[in-house]
Each structure stands twice: as structure tokens, then as C-alpha cells.
Amino acid sequence: MSFKSWLNKFIAEKGIDPEYIMEVEGPVWGMNLIPVQVLVDAICSAPRHEQAAIKKTIVRIDFLNGNVLDYFKHLAKAIAI
């Protein structure tokens, strides 16, 4: 299964709305509104070694019953403008 398929399946199984908007402070424009799907697209275009690290972290958060949206918000800071 490709990383993109795995990530989309994970999001669907967890009941996360791909259109859910995360508010993230950006270095230039201030508050950015980033939908989960935009972050997913950015993650899926990342190099494979970064995808592997992200997947490992998501699996760990899920195993520990953590909130993966907190991690997504952290990742969204990297694409905020």
C-alpha cells in the first residue's frame, strides 16, 4: 500500500474530516487556515524518508491514544506562510 493510500485510509478510519481547518501562525502572514487535506497533499509530496518518519510518529501517537490532529497542526507550521 502506498503512503498516500495508507494516510488517507488512516484519516478516514479515525473519522478526521479532510476539510477540517487548522489555525497555524505563520512567519509572514500571521494566522494561516490550513485544511487537513492540504497538509496531507504536502506530506505526500515530501521525500520518502520524511514520509517514513511521519508515519512512524502517527502510528506511535495512535498506539498511545493521542490526538493525531495535534501532530498535524505541528506539521502544518512547516507550510504556513
Image (cartoon, rainbow, N blue to C red):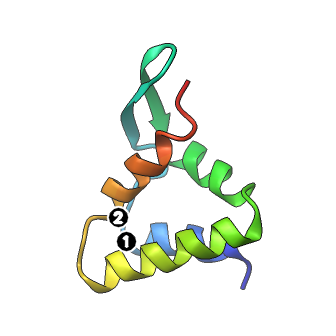
Residue 4 in view (yes/no): no
Q: Please determine whether, in this image, residue 26 is positioned above or below residue 17.
A: above
Label 2 with label 1: CB-CB less than 8 Å = yes
Q: Element under label 2?
A: helix
Hey, what amino acid is under mark 2? Val
Q: Position of residue 43 (x, y in %)?
A: 63, 56
Q: Element under label 1?
A: loop
Query: Considering only order in the chain, which callout, 1 or 2, is on the residue closer to the N terminus?
Result: 1
Q: Residue at x 40, y 49 (%)?
A: 74
Of residues 28 and 55, the one drawn nearer to the viewer in this rendering: 28
Q: Nearer the viewer, mark 2 or mark 1?
A: 2
The image quadrant that residue 71 belongs to is bottom left
Q: Residues within 10 Å of mark 2 (few under 14, many from 20)?
A: some
Q: Residue at x 49, y 74 (%)?
A: 10
Of residues 9 and 66, the one drawn nearer to the viewer in this rendering: 66
Q: Position of residue 6 (x, y in %)?
A: 61, 77
Q: Please determine whether, in this image, residue 74 is positioned above or below residue 10.
A: above
- Residue pointed to by mark 2: 68
Q: Please determine whether, in this image, residue 41 is positioned above or below residue 12.
A: above
Q: Position of residue 17 (x, y in %)?
A: 41, 53
Q: Residue at x 39, y 47 (%)?
A: 73
Hey, what amino acid is under mark 1? Lys
The image quadrant that residue 55 belongs to is bottom right
Q: Position of residue 30 (x, y in %)?
A: 41, 16
* Direction from residue 64 to residue 77 in the image, left or right: right
Compute the Cα span from label 2 to label 1. Answer: 9 Å
Where is the N terminus found, in terms of image quarters?
Answer: bottom right
- Residue pointed to by mark 1: 14
